[in-house]
Amino acid sequence: MYPVTYHRPASVEEALHLLAEEEEAMALAGGQTLLPTMKQHLAAPSALVDLAACGLSGIRAEGGGLVIGAMTTHAEIAASAEVAAHLPVLGLVAAGIGDPAVRHRGTIGGSVANNDPAADYPAALLALEARIETDRRVLAAEEFFEGLFATALEEGEIVTRIHLDPPKRAAYAKFPNPASRYALVGVMVAETAAGIRVAVTGAGEDGVFRHAGLEAALDAEFTPDAAAAVRVSPAGLAADLHASAAYRAHLIAVMAARAVAAC
Amino acid sequence: MSENGIGKPVKRREDRRFLTGRGRYTDDLRMENQAYAAFVRSPHAHARVSGIDAAAALEQEGVIRVLTGPELVADGIGNIITGWAITSKDGAPMKVGDWSALATDRVRYVGDAVAVVIAETRQGARNAAELVEVSYEELPAVARGDRALQPGAPQLHDVAPGNLVFDWEIGDAAATDAALAAAATVVELSLENNRLAPNAMEPRSAVAVHDPAEDHYTLYTTSQNPHVARLVLSAFYQVAPEHKLRVVAPDVGGGFGSKIYIYPEEITCLWAAMKTGRSVKWTSERNEAFMTDAHGRDHVTTARMGFDEGGRITGFKVETIANLGAYCSLFATATPTYLYATLLSGQYDIPAIHANVKAAYSNTVPVDAYRGAGRPEATYLVERMMTTAARQMGMEEAELRRRNFIQSFPHQTPVIMCYDAGDFPGNLDKAMAAADVAGFPARRAEAAARGMLRGLGYSCYIEACGIAPSKAVGALGAGVGLWESAEMRVNPVGTIEILTGSHSHGQGHETTFAQIVADRFGVPIESISILHGDTDKVQFGMGTYGSRSGAVGMSAIVRAMDKVEAKVRRIAAHLLDGAPEDIVIEDGQARLPGTNRSLAWHEIGLAAYTAHDLPEGMEPGLKETAFYDPVNFTFPAGTYICEVEVDPQTGVVRIVQFTAADDFGTVINPMIVEGQVHGGVAQGIGQALLEQVVYDEAGQLLTGSYMDYCMPRADDVPFYTITHNATVCPGNPLGMKGCGEAGAIGSPPAVINAVTDAIGTNDLSMPATPMKVWQALAGARAPAAAE
């Protein structure tokens, strides 16, 4: 790791000020991606602005839905009684992220701001039509997740809260990469007030995406067989050591069917 | 018999310190005046080095020195050697290209060391290393062994035209060709043995200390064989003469072969300590380990096996290309020859065998021995061949194996090895019973009802441990003898120190070696210490690899105990007024039967050291040394049966049962032996289903971290069913065969044979990842569907 200055501001305002002041500063949430990246010299911020003391942790039920602070850890979400009562699927997603150490440090805000193309939360939030609140605005998940590690966040903008409404039903099925155990393909299926939503992570060349064909098929008939019968095109899907685009396309339908079965 | 003696599952005495964080590993050491080394490594698979500019690095605060290859050569540091001379079939010696610890003018793999930065801090050294500007002129690269041997491939070493290190053969080509021509059935098989990264839990590390007052060097390092390291550093790299160089391998966290070799980093640290007047420490990071630790396996093979009408094997012909990487590592040339092709007879009576092995240079990290070293490659080929043949001929695979088993011993194979003992049908019977093979059809039907494909696979492996005797391996090209030494010191108070040339880096020697001493003399195990890993304490030794520490290392201890016992008998007879041959030694006492006279162990020790009343002419003291050179290899063998379920929707393979029936001869500590089987099988499952080092066409390492290199995790392996069958090895005093590698040797074909049984196609390569299994299934259903 290169030398780096560490700040621990006590408020979002102070954090914003620090980030604005120093061009190469980066916000630090749980650090489960950023710190290993810095250790490998793949990231070299001049300063880290740790958001841990900015009052961004916590889960509260509000208006039938949930408001989750950006610094809430995966382990807290997995163990939360509010989440279990209102949005159990989110607790299951959180419980399946990484390993216990990652879940006790990693945060939902850090995950969505990073928008790793193989992360679980982006698929969950996209299918659940979450709203992502920042220090300056509220964005729909659809607008927020833009591509590989790309979001609608502006320079120095900080995710503060995630707003979620309970779906009528929802489930997530993940096929882990055998090596990294990130999602090789992760499919979140949800029936929300707006209709059937199927969001796919791990597979897209441009990160998380919704699959119109699966949504249409499940809108017509919400059964595992209906999902499994959809021929998912490999076009636009990632190909690497672990999976060809064709295999990912196949797995999307299989995982969608399994998610439907679990709904 | 002692409660802590032979055959008892004594808890590992060393685990107290390991499990409480009190182990002392090389990186734990802090020297006076310690500085840190960081290596500047080639980002290119193949390039000419046209210049090195260290100015920017030297300007950094805390940077002490930047050293390069030309300076190393100018100081007379020799090239890295390979320890086993192979002769090609045309009589030509093998072609070994120069390997300098720091590259002088050319780099040949990604990670090849070009320069080293010595700085006050670890981080400072690493950061400065990035500022060393190396000018490279990139050259075309080749990463696969078979492609490296093709005409027009990029050339690595001028001395090795066509990248051919050697073209070696074993066995009778004419007899084998004739047998295949006359065979009723010929079965053909082409396969690859996937390249693996060793992944010891503790990365490599070195701390080099130079004492200018005595011109004496000490190297603390992660070595499986510190004496061999000292010998090689002294005799070939000219770092220092042996009496001016001490090598210490303190607690070492796993090796699997990768810590046998003397790597560029350790040599460079010793030299840098002298150049800078500082103690120099280097510890590999995990990504450096993937790039620079010697890899294992990497064979491409085609084979043909002939059978008569009764299913008896008539001949076996094998063509293998072994990828040795960019340079010849220490045992790299022995692994795909004498440790591989000599096991191609498997457990079977095969009248004619011929193997041709071509070894290739490529732009990849050197390949060398890794847990099993050659024997896994042989076993994978032979056992996949047997299963393929059974399927092709429509026979039960257990029956085909049984029909060809060697049944009488000694058995001379056509490929050098002379098997001394074994019970191959007995191993198979035990494994089949433990695996409930009879119940398999019902389990398969039950799985099918759930939409799952269930398969059963066999592997009847044999391997060879304790490479020996020295005279024989010398005749085959080995640069060293492969004996072992031991010293037994009985102190005046009766406590015992055993000094051994074996080295423990996870094997539990501090327990098992003490067990054989406790067993022999009936003394408490707490009174026995095992000392190893320090060339200042143990005079010489050959170290631990090839599952040799039991069969060879413990045999040396037995010989030293023989000598101590003889002296104890004489002392006791003298003091108890009897004859030496009448003395009984048990329960920590020497007794004279028929009398009430006895001496406690500490009384014997005291008598030996006070020397007030010893037999006439006897030297005082009680300390004996032995060097033991075995008469033959030992031959552990067994049957492994793997049962899997394949999810046809995803291609995921789940191992539902894994049964091992091993014949390791005498077992000293069954708990430790089972642990070795567990670990070995886990690594074999890793090879079969998960692990593979991948370089792209340009020689870039694609599996440079655990994000892409898949190690087995706890949920990838089953609870094992383990049974033993024991035929005593006639070749050593304890009747032991060795257990350290069998699991890794025997298990991959059992897993793959089970998966191919489940999916109904033999066209599957290791690692059988979910995608590959899915593709094989899709290919079997409709060849165009899989991409």
Image (cartoon, helix red, strand yellow):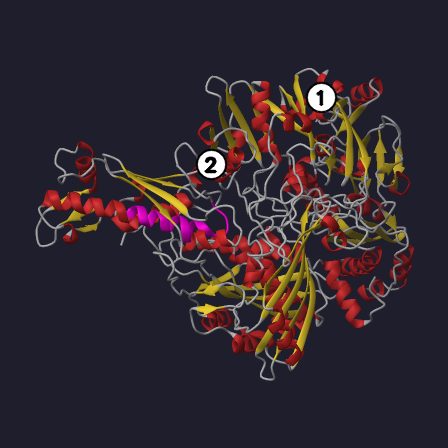
Q: Magenta stretch?
A: B544-561
What is the chain identity of the residue bearing mark 1? A
Residue A3: image tag: 1
- Work out whether residue A216 can be spotted: yes
Same chain, labels 1 and 2 = no
Q: Is residue B397 above or below residue A38?
A: below
Residue A211 placed where, x, y %? 89, 54
Quick check: is B339 in the magenta stretch? no
The subunit letter for the residue under badge 2 reads: B
Residue hosting label 2: B20
Query: In this view, which residue lies farthest toward the bottom?
Result: B309
Q: Which quarter shows the N terminus of chain A?
A: top right
Task: Report if residue B552 lies within the magenta region.
Answer: yes
Query: Regarding mark 2 in the picture, which secondary structure is present there?
Result: loop
**Residue nearer the viewer, B361 or A113:** B361
Quarter residue A98 falls in: top right
x%, y% of residue B172?
59, 68
